Amino acid sequence: MSFLAETRRRRTFAIISHPDAGKTTLTEKLLLFSGAIQIAGSVKARKASRHATSDWMEIEKQRGISVASSVMQMVYREHVINLLDTPGHKDFSEDTYRVLTAVDSALMVIDAANGVEAQTRRLIEVCRQRDTPIITFVNKMDREVREPLDILDEVERELGMPCVPMTWPVGQGKSFRGIMNLRTQAMTVFESGSERLPHDFETIPLSERDTLVKRFGADFEHAMESMELATGASPTWDREAFLAGKQTPVFFGSGVNNFGVMEVLDALVDLAPSPQSRTSTTLVNRQPVVKEIQPEDKDFAGVVFKVQANMDANHRDRIAFVRMASGKYTPGMKLKVQRTAKELRPTSVVTFMSQRREAVEEAYAGDIVGFTTHGGVQLGDTITDGANLQFTGLPFFAPELFMTVILKNPLRTKQLQQGLAQLGEEGAIQVFRPEVGGPMLLGAVGQLQFEVVQHRLKAEYDADVRLEGCQYTGARWITADTPAELREFVHAYPVRMAKDAADTLAFLCTSPYDVRLAQERFPKIHFHPLREHA
Ligand code: G4P
């Protein structure tokens, strides 16, 4: 297959939902129907067995949340589909944000009884900012749920974009009869159970209206009416508008019953975009210049959007997850980390098949490649086979929660420093070193991040720490137009200055007024609520 065809046949998407809407179930069914796994239950089983792989994962087990996000690849209808899972818990929203920078589209799963829930709302905001195309799946139609028109209305309001129904449910709950596929103009008849494959479901053309009315009676008539209302009120399907994040195709079904899932899988192939261009900067005469990297560019370029420590605490290696933006990866290729200009020397390079990690034979734009290293790679790093560029858009948010780290056994200082440096590079937490000395500060967006870090410091670095509250409630990264201005500012607030893991200067604040006051006093200083990898 040609290089161009290889990139064009890729689809890289994230699956997003509020916890319990059915994300894991749907993921599993997508893998099942693409042939990537043989038996239903294995993703769930893996979700469970993962808990046993390391101690700190106990936290995940206790709270029934998914701390780490994962990557799965499948092949369906000659297309290579990369599915990226996102952590559902709000305390890990930073991780989710980063995953969303690595995809070209998103699949949003909604519980038909609950509609758009809090966590989904936050994820939608992120997608909207980036104009990520969204496919919507309304799940659990086999339950007593809300009227489809009502759900559609809510999705439209929350997304701020029109819905275009692709399938439409007939009945719901105990009287769920099936879905009408508006593209093929046929009804697929619902049967419960999880052993059925998609082609096992009976289909009846909508043109056989008498048969359908006879068999499904008022449920069918009612569905026809509401479907006509819905389609009458929605715009016609416009793929360009969808790709621009201006309309969302909507599917209905029941993941647990394998029902309505195939339609989603087909949509990923037929509607979702192939790898899109990505923005980077490159230095021309020492000045950064914006450069769009196209998936069909021949040179290898990718960005680290996630770093994960080895689950085995005895091995200090970590996997850097790289989203390829262009080129072709082949084993043995020489790659460079742009930040350090050092060669990347991985101990292994893997792709993430549905159930296992496999050595990569080749990979293209859109693919996620995992490089196992002993360090030297951090979140946001750009990896290329030579070109000097840096991808933009992977942000760090100013933390809103802070704790000081007190080491219980002072002899473990080295281990603590190593641990914090590595956890900081992974993006598990943000670490700030106050300029005047004293204990290190941990900054987080969600409370649970502290617990994970405390647990991991002990389990992986044998550094037993106590976390204590402190007066800080925010931070702003600081820049100035001239070094003299910056010096003057630092001089005025010596105890408020700290450096983060990337050695970027930050101003610590105890209330939102702090920033305002400091800004009034020093109008030429820039205060940044987020830092992009520089
Ligand atoms: P999540 O990853 O979004 O958190 O959701 P997950 O797939 O784990 O599903 C949450 C619960 O909803 C599970 O029930 C699952 O079986 C159920 N579920 C998923 N899809 C459907 C559906 O289409 N219809 C119905 N009725 N239920 C659905 P559980 O009791 O928490 O777990 P389990 O014991 O069934 O595995």
Image: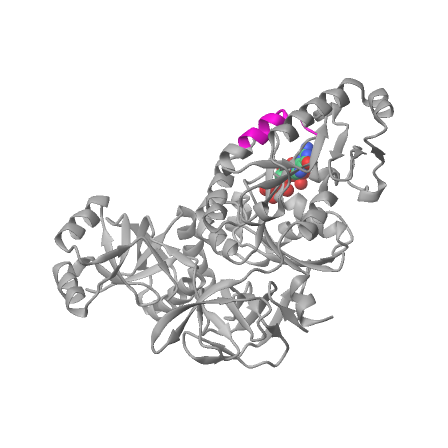
| Residue bounds of the magenta highlight | 142-154
Residue 46 versus residue 261 in the image, above or below:
below
The percent coordinates of residue 176 (x first, y second) are 74, 27
Q: How many marks?
A: 0
Q: Is residue 280 left or right of residue 478?
A: right
Is 386 contained in the magenta span?
A: no
Residue 360, located in which quarter of the rendered image? bottom right
Q: In which quarter of the image is the C terminus?
A: bottom left
Most foreground residue, 348 or 201: 201
The percent coordinates of residue 134 (x first, y second) are 57, 45
Is 151 contained in the magenta span?
A: yes
Q: Which residue is drawn at 33% across and 63% down?
A: 409
The percent coordinates of residue 293 (x first, y second) are 51, 67
Q: Which residue is drawn at 86% across and 20% down?
A: 214
Q: In which quarter of the image is the N terminus?
A: bottom right
Most foreground residue, 37 or 156: 156
Q: In this view, does 453 lie to the left or right of 475?
A: right
Residue that extends furthest to the top in the rendered view of this protein: 218
Does residue 314 appear in the picture of this structure? Answer: no
The percent coordinates of residue 146 (x first, y second) are 61, 25
Residue 74 versus residue 5 in the image, above or below:
above
Q: State the scheme by which the image is colored.
A: one colour
Does residue 117 appear in the picture of this structure? Answer: yes
Residue 277 versus residue 298 in the image, above or below:
above
Residue 253, located in which quarter of the rendered image? top right
Q: State ligand 1's quadrant.
A: top right
Q: Residue at x 71, y 39 (%)?
A: 256
Most foreground residue, 369 or 290: 290
Q: Residue at x 47, y 61 (%)?
A: 459
Most foreground residue, 413 or 388: 388
